[in-house]
Image (cartoon, rainbow, N blue to C red):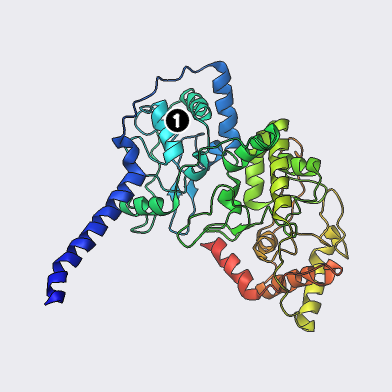
Amino acid sequence: MIRGRLGPWLILLAAGLGLSTLGAVFWLNWGDWLQTERPQTPPVATAESIARGEYLARIGHCIACHTRRGGEPLAGGRPIATPFGPVYSSNLTPDPDTGLGQWTADDFWRALHLGRSRNGRLLAPAFPYEHTSVLTRNDSDALFAWLREQPALAHRPPPHGLAWPVGTQAALAVWRALFFRPQAFRNDPRQSAEWNRGAYLVKGPGQCAACHGPRNAWGAGQGVDALSGSRMAASHWYAPSLISEAETGLASTPIDDIVRLLQTGISPTASTSGPMAEVVQHSLQHMTADDLRAMAAYLQWRAREAGPVSVRASAAASPATDRARGRAVYEQHCADCHGRNGEGRAPAYPALQGNRAVRLADPSNLVQLVLHGGYPPVTLGNPQPYGMPPFLLELDDRDIAATLNYLRSTLQAGEATAGEVSPQQVRRVRDAASR
């Protein structure tokens, strides 16, 4: 009898909880529209603000991301790979039909700060609004002012290829309610002006955690300051931890060397490749000397604050036959450039002995470089970089695995190694490139 009386109340309770959840999701995504906020007076664009906008567009990777290969600058259409399907960057030119021609500075600010388009549509988080929400309103207005000065180009990017229901507005609303909160930047009064500038650049325009921050199964990061390393979404590149001495050594690297690496793509002990080389070429090399030093100082502070980070234990050593195979391949294909003992030949060919990149627990970057070769970025400070040829067709999976294991053990001269590379790992990277 009592159970029968409780039935309607339980239904009402469940319905109330469901409505409350829907209301919370709606409020977190569109609640500001219900408030009394009114459009601000349009900011007056000046030569100074337009110049600052161009600077922000370059260092924030806007131009590179919103320009498809062979396409017009900022007209959009570049595919951004995600685990859930491709997202295509939007047209940022002032074209009235396919770009930002009908947008206001307020619309643009809401897109950067709230991840919401002019018509209220929620944007896919491949657009890194977690990081652009950090930008100040003045920087947002400056960026918009510069974009308004660019040629209007009529180009409508393809629709996103996200798997259903990931790309639906309902799914995005739930995702954002769970994982996204705008991050307004606030200076830390306990720190120097340089430290605060570096923090702003790392969390905002630099978007460092977008690559170097771990993500969960739903593609959500752990915040704009999470820098503990991550396998990059939908790729076989690993962005190493910026707070681990074992992986990047930022705590002990001289500031001038960090600045040089960010600006030119090379330093006395390291070079960039893959996605990081693209970031240096299209964005970081355009930073001012003061901003580069501020970013370097902040990253070094983060690494020192993190302290020692444990390194994954090594796996069992490879059989003697594999070590012999790896040595034979190395001596035939690698020793002429990198030296018989991995000592390298600066500045053209980096040393492999004692190289942190060689000892990373995740060997993805090594496999990528051996398969596909690579160059550091072309920059003003390194206009003719030396490169490595691809061995995609010349070496099979066992050859590559054996060679990398030889590098990660025999050539490390007593340094800690990070485990074996299997032929299956090489095959996964090889197959991903062919898709």
On screen, 363 above or below 115?
A: below
Q: Which element carries disc 1, helix, strand or loop? A: loop
Residue 404 visible: yes
In the displayed structure image, the side of residue 18 where residue 183 appears, left or right: right
Residue at horizontal 34%, vertical 59%?
Answer: 164
Quarter in which the N terminus is drawn = bottom left
Q: Position of residue 369 (x, y in %)?
A: 69, 59
Can you identify the residue that label 1 sits on? Answer: 93
In the displayed structure image, the side of residue 52 where residue 87 appears, left or right: left
Total marks shown come to 1
In the displayed structure image, the side of residue 388 where residue 166 appears, left or right: left
On screen, 389 above or below 394?
A: above
Q: Nearer the viewer, residue 42 or 14?
A: 14
Looking at numbered disc 1 in the image, what kind of residue is underneath it? Thr
Q: Position of residue 29 (x, y in %)?
A: 35, 45
Residue 67 visible: no
Q: Position of residue 333 (x, y in %)?
A: 79, 65
